[in-house]
Image: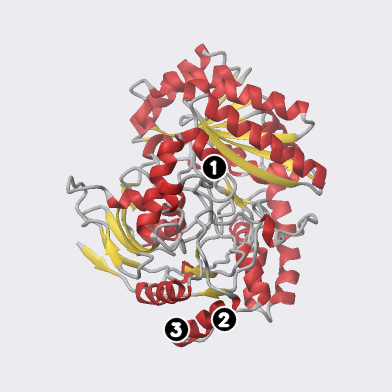
Amino acid sequence: MSVILSRIVARPGARSSRLWLHSYRHASSSASRLSPGERLAGRLHNAAVGTALLTAAAAVYYHITEPVHLDGEAAIGGPQPKRTTKVTVHQHIPESSTETSYGSKEDVQKAIAELRQAIPRKSAVNTDPAVLQMYGSSDKSYHPTSPHSVVVHPVSTEEVVEVVNVARKYRVPIVPYSGATSLEGHFSGYPSGSICIDISGMNKILEIHEDDSDLVCQAGARWEDINLILKEKGIPLFFPLDPGPGATIGGMIGTGCSGTNAVRYGTARGEWFLNVTVVLPNGKVIKTRRRARKSSAGIDMTKLFIGAEGTLGIVTEATLRLAPVIPSKVAMAQFPDVEHAVSAVQEILNTPAGPHIQCVELLDDHMMKAIADAGLVSEAYPIYDTLFFKIQGDPAAIDSAAKTVQDIVARHRSMYFKFAKTDEEAEDLWESRKYALMSTIESEEGARCWTTDVCVPVSKLPELVYETKKDLKQSKLRSTIVGHVGDGNFHAFILFKSDNELKAVSDAVHRLVHRAIALDGTCTGEHGVGVGKKEYLAEELGPDTVGLMWTIKRAIDPLDIMNPGKLYPDMPKDDSDLRA
């Protein structure tokens, strides 16, 4: 059965934590008790209503109040600590190392005028300075940025082609933008002037093929909205990749994302994207393959654009593979240290119970203390390194897998094990994982949070966590750790208040990345490279691999107009072959 849809997935692009908190408060009003987190949510909601009234006259500024989306959870809205501006002087902003000559200021203005003619729709082309600054920076990351020259809001592949053709004509860089959840400076503006192309309005689900377990959507559709629509239609399928709330399909493809479900379902680099439609720098539109579940016809061109971060073309549509919805329950186990927790996970995943583990998340002792101190959850647990499991399957499979998990964690010196037997118990138990980032932020008044991620072979994770926690302690930095431990991927949430502390945090992140690479790991497990981590690629991949990346980039985008200054490490000055 093929269902053709014209429904637009409403983009609360800006569905901020204020709306989320309102829904949460409304849903819990009939509950018999209010947790501390619910009470705090209610207070923040009331405060947000007043703020919303003040900004109603200019809807675009509503986007400025979007929540911080880090590591799969949305931060609470409300007042934020004062921070230094993200719009820095141009000479400090990473630029293309290809010695490309971009259009002059006059060329940029001509491009803007031509864009208004090409897409005459009201508000499709925006040059409001506040909007340009907002779209060129993010309070979610701490890398140098610059405002764009213009923001364009296309609603179709054809309009994206118009934008690309104008950009190529005047040699103006193009920067893609959608969910704005990226953390490494992916959508910062370019110093000479840039066109920000916001595809969040391209958010339609175009086709659902239930019998084939796939669907076709535009790149601005959000993964949560896709799953909600499938649920509303009674279709027992879902899209299992689960990065931060608000992430769109285009951004997920661009960064090669994953999330808590990766231990069971893998990442964006698996087979979850059957094909993509892409507007190339030359204005041509390609579809990377047909809708068949598998194909051995030539090079997998779909993979070429996964993780390319908008540097090779603009993804406008994708075909997503779906998975069946499977019931799940939650369990928790606490350990004396990370090493015992990780060794337990390694053994569990190599048993017949392994395929039933949907998620396995590590929260370190600092995180458990932050959760207890913040008071956002209905029940706080002892301060130990803790694993949270989601176990999926039919009732018999879940019971069997839970028994295996309990037996194994006991052999690895677990002091406490809890299994949620009902959905309500499971939701309460998973609260600690759900509110991890929010609890970190709430644990220290006035602090801001830098989040970063790395990934290593699972067996190396205890060493990495131990050395990182020791380093952060010696640097007198407050931090918590959340790990997708089944993948060896962990996120450090590091707090700071001053510019001096911000510098110390940046240095600590630098050491963390080198530490991970030295353990045969990667500088990023799921956040992507952007501006923040491109300096590490040569060390991680080797100069020849980076050279091949540049060869592909120059072949597809010889003018280097697609998101320049991101992803690719700077080329050596004497590398004439790549510059040719």
| Residue 267 picture quarter | top left
Label 3 SS: loop
C-alpha distance separating marks 2 and 3: 15 Å
Residue marked by disc 3: 119
Confirm or deny contact between disc 2 and disc 1 (CB under 8 A).
no
Front: mark 1 or 3: 3
- Quarter of the picture holding the C terminus: bottom left
Q: Sequence order check: which comes first, mark 1 or mark 3?
A: 3
Confirm or deny contact between disc 2 and disc 3 (CB under 8 A).
no
C-alpha distance separating marks 2 and 1: 53 Å
| Residue 136 picture quarter | bottom right
Name the residue at 38% across, 44% down. 548
Residue 180 location in percent, x, y? 56, 60
Residue 241 visible in rendering: no
Q: Amino acid at mark 3?
A: Ile
Q: Sequence order check: which comes first, mark 2 or mark 1?
A: 2
Front: mark 2 or 1: 2
Label 1 crowd bin: few (<14), some (14–19), many (20+), radius 10 Å: some
Q: Sequence order check: which comes first, mark 2 or mark 3?
A: 2
- Give the side of residue 196 with respect to residue 479, left or right: left
Judging depth in this view, the residue of 9 and 98 nearest the camera is 98
Name the residue at 54% across, 37% down. 523
Residue marked by disc 2: 109
- Give the side of residue 434 with respect to residue 33, left or right: left
- Quarter of the picture holding the N terminus: bottom left
Q: Is residue 512 above or below residue 243?
A: above
Residue marked by disc 1: 427
Residue 128 location in percent, x, y? 64, 78
Q: Is residue 62 above or below residue 522?
A: below
- Give the side of residue 25 with respect to residue 516, left or right: right
Name the residue at 31% across, 52% down. 302
Judging depth in this view, the residue of 550 and 314 nearest the camera is 550
